[in-house]
Amino acid sequence: MGLEKNLLLNKKSGIIYGANGHNKGETKVGKREKLLEAIRNNPVDIPFETIKNLLFYYGCTLRVKKHYVFSHPALDYIITIPRGRKIKAVYAKEAIRMVDDIIDALSKD
């Protein structure tokens, strides 16, 4: 969708920065909340692009090596998703946990 327009690539480091803080109205927030709830209820067979766009929306960065590595400056951990495979439920659950932790960390500031 439109999220890809807001991505920045640092060619030197190979890090892709996600857009943070979309202010496009409540419909975006509602869609994100519905998506989070849908993944929580059934984390099986979630497309990688969906996970990636969700994490980018919340300001995560992506490094692509042998695996996809997502991080966020407000968190002290990363999540790693293997490349070239279907996304297993465990990785979708890790992504949801990361989003929840980002929301918690940013709400405390």
Image (cartoon, grey):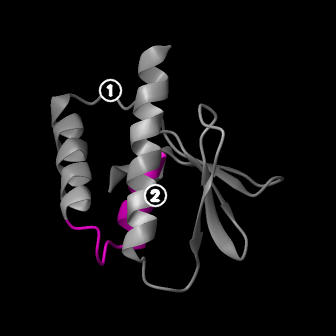
The residue labelled by disc 2 is 94
Query: Within the image, what quadrant is residue 46 found in?
Result: bottom left
Mark 1 lies on residue: 23
Residue 96 or residue 5, whichever sits in front = 96
Segment tinted magenta in the rendering: 42-56
88 relative position to 73: left or right: left
Kindly report the secondary structure that dominates the magenta region of the rendered protein.
Answer: helix
Secondary structure under tag 1 reads: loop
Residue shown at the point (54%, 48%) measured from the top left = 7
Q: Given the image, on which type of amino acid does mark 2 rest?
A: Glu
Q: Residue furthest bottom?
A: 85
Percent x, y for residue 8? 61, 46
The x, y position of residue 3, in whole percent, is 40, 49
Does residue 3 show up? yes
Q: Earlier in the sequence, mark 1 or mark 2?
A: 1
- Residue 51, above or below 45: above
- 59 or 72: which is nearer to us? 72
Residue that extends furthest to the top in the rendered view of this protein: 109
